[in-house]
Amino acid sequence: MNGIILRQSLENTRILISGGAGFIGAALAHYLLLNTKAFIIIVDNFNDPDNSQFKEVRLEYVKNEALKNPERLQIVNGDIRDKGFIENTMKTFLPQVVVHLDEQASVVNCKNDPGEKPQSNEGEIEKLLQTCKVQGDQGYPVQHFLYVSVSPQKTDEFIVSSDAESYHMPCTGLRLFDVYGPMGCTDMDCFSFCKKMINGEKIYINDHERNYTYIEDAIRTISELILCIPNEDDNGVRSAHYNICDDNPVSLMTFIATLANVMKEQDVLRSDYDYKDYIKLIDKQPVDEKNSYSDITSLKKRILSQPRTSLHDGLTEFVKWYIHITQGMHVHMDLLKQICDGFNKVYIFGAGKFSRLLLSRLGADAKHLFEGIIVQRDNNPTSINGIKVHHIEEISDKANVAVIVAIENNAEVIKLLKNKGFNNVFYLGTFMEMNDFQTIEKLIKRDREIESYYDYFINNKPLFKYLEIETLNRCNGTCEFCPVNVNEKQRPYKKMDARMFYSIIDQLEELKYEGKLGLFSNNEPFLDDRISLFAKYARDKLPNANIYLITNGTLVTLDKFKEIISDLDLCIFDNYISDSIPENVVACLDYCKQNGIEEKIQYCKIPRDLIRSSRGGKSPNGQVSYITKWRCQLPLVQMVIRPDGKVSLCCNDALGLNTLGDISNQSILDIWYGDSFKKIRNLLKNGRGQIELCKYCNYNDLRDVW
């Protein structure tokens, strides 16, 4: 490491990363939190509409690494072009190292327009450098300033040297080449190529050689360069400039071929897909360089960690991540086009994350399908992805018009639209899983946990964690999302024999059951006047079990509540009727507060016409037309017993269409470890499509698997 002063440790060093929620910035912050004892300050203005969801996911990724020492991470929302903001931020945190990554990640990034070049923002760098100099003049010098540069190499070297001389601080320029990997930006080559391959679209390129750099290699290199402060040259200037890239350039055609092979290996593309059938070569643009790779000889002389991940391995990690992300963005195109073809005009309601996800997933098709986007509030963009945004009051022609609601508060919006004269209203969740990227990341983690729990179950045969006993199969609710509400066709009346209930509890006592016991399932538990007696018996026999129930509260008097609450760990009131808290529920809440047992009661206000999960494909207002790819944990952790002793597939089998056992002639253990449950588990391990009830069920249980 000639000419370099190696700082031995970053312990307690304050490092400010501008653009810290971006692709490279977040990866760098995570790496430094994991591998050093530095304090990290992330600065970002979160203003990128195309990648804002990814920024949330990246920040969660970084925050999780800082959980053990949260004081080591600060996240500041603001724009570094705002002089007052950056001066205040620098004054507050007094960083010793500044890494400016609020620039394009690549020198050249082939998008739909291969001639497009990233634009440098020298004003941002200048403001940062000026603020750093002021901080140094006040006795708190920035020991190292690093920033991404995108000008031609000789120009970059001159700029970095000039900055180091002008602002009297060590400066290092970083020239990055085509960085790619998980959590990257949607304009990355691999992102756009993946989408085009899956959709069978043409891929327009001008073929040339490039240096692709895997994200982990890039941030490992940057991290080591943070430690390397340039020595003074003959003029007393401390500056350095490095190209960061893999030193094995590949042609764009080779990149696409490798990506196609990886996608086949991961079962994303059919085995007979031939990428050459979809390639369309175009002429080189006037501004294009023939090739965009560079020499990293100087980098090799300075540090040990040069990029070394092979293109195949890097793309494999990207494709695995892409598969999970796009699972939550799958759109049932046939149904969507059927709706759009059936009306003169189709609008999307909502300009938020779900409408943006839909438009992103549809790509160019969106402009042909939708007339525009309807919003209710002011201060919205004039267009999103090229589709015009209209205020709801601007739409006068409502004849043969359809609206697709793309927000979560769907019940209120559907009511609003119908009051405004829109008679054909559809819910986006019917043909697309409405998961934002943050939720998808949680589902990815849970999906992996379920996958490993399947193997654990086979080897260790654990007992269920959740048992629901439905003692009476009736409900007095009118909830539109529920298959057993009073307005739907009723199930044949069943009431559990008390001796059967006691037998179930006795078996649980022998098993020393300590899991959750719900004294309800798809019913209103207080319709059974024995429910308090059942709760008492269960508590006496199962002192360590977590006994709870959920009620709509309409039949619960204060006396009934007092009678049962001592034997429950939790009583949940779901109010589907009144906008205010009903008086009887207020009395129960007050009773718990007065007696110091507030943790035993929970109140929720839920619109009765809310569209929720599809409930095994049987929800009256929430049926879907797609098969979710997320695994289900319920057959591994839950047992549901109906009033006649029959055991349902799960809590979403509200109508009891599947029977996996019968308590009247089988023991709990015989049922749980029996052939029927075993068959269901084997089928669900590979997805939901092979079981009729599960096929169109989009319920995702987020309770702890382990």
Image (cartoon, rainbow, N blue to C red):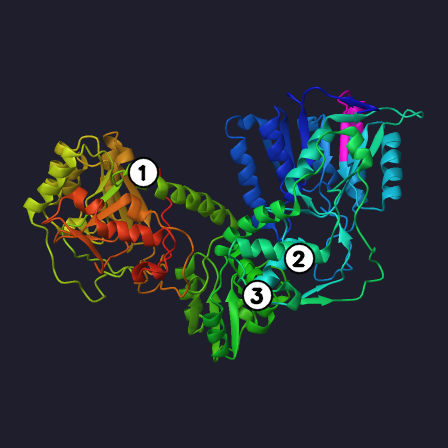
Q: Is residue 277 visible?
A: yes
| Residue in the image at 76% along x and 62% along y | 206
Locate residue 253, reporting x and y percent: 71, 58
**511 and 382: which is toward the camera:** 511
How would you rate the neighbour count of disc 3 (Cα within 10 Å): few for under 14, some for 14-19, many for 20 or more?
few
Locate residue 524, reporting x and y percent: 19, 52
Q: Amino acid at mark 3?
A: Asn
Is 301 inside the magenta-drawn segment?
Answer: no
Identify the secondary structure beneath mark 3. helix
Identify the secondary structure beneath mark 2. helix
Q: Which mark is first along the chain, 2 or 1?
A: 2
Of the residues tagged 1 and 3, which is closer to the observer?
1
Q: Which mark is first along the chain, 3 or 2?
A: 3
Q: Which mark is first along the chain, 3 or 1?
A: 3
Q: Amino acid at mark 1?
A: Asn
Is 143 inside the magenta-drawn segment?
Answer: yes
Eyeballing the image, is 415 above or below 502? below
The magenta segment is: 133-146
Q: Is residue 650 left or right of residue 249?
A: left
| Residue in the image at 31% along x and 65% along y | 620
Q: Quarter of the image containing the C terminus? A: top left
- Report the residue marked by disc 2: 256
In three-dimensional space, the C-alpha distance between marks 1 and 2, rounded to whole angstroms, equals 42 Å
Q: Is residue 278 visible?
A: no
Q: Is residue 526 left or right of residue 109?
A: left
Locate residue 658, reporting x and y percent: 22, 58
Q: Amino acid at mark 2?
A: Ile
Residue 459: which numbered mark, if any? 1
Quarter of image, res 22: top right
Locate residue 121, reporting x and y percent: 78, 46
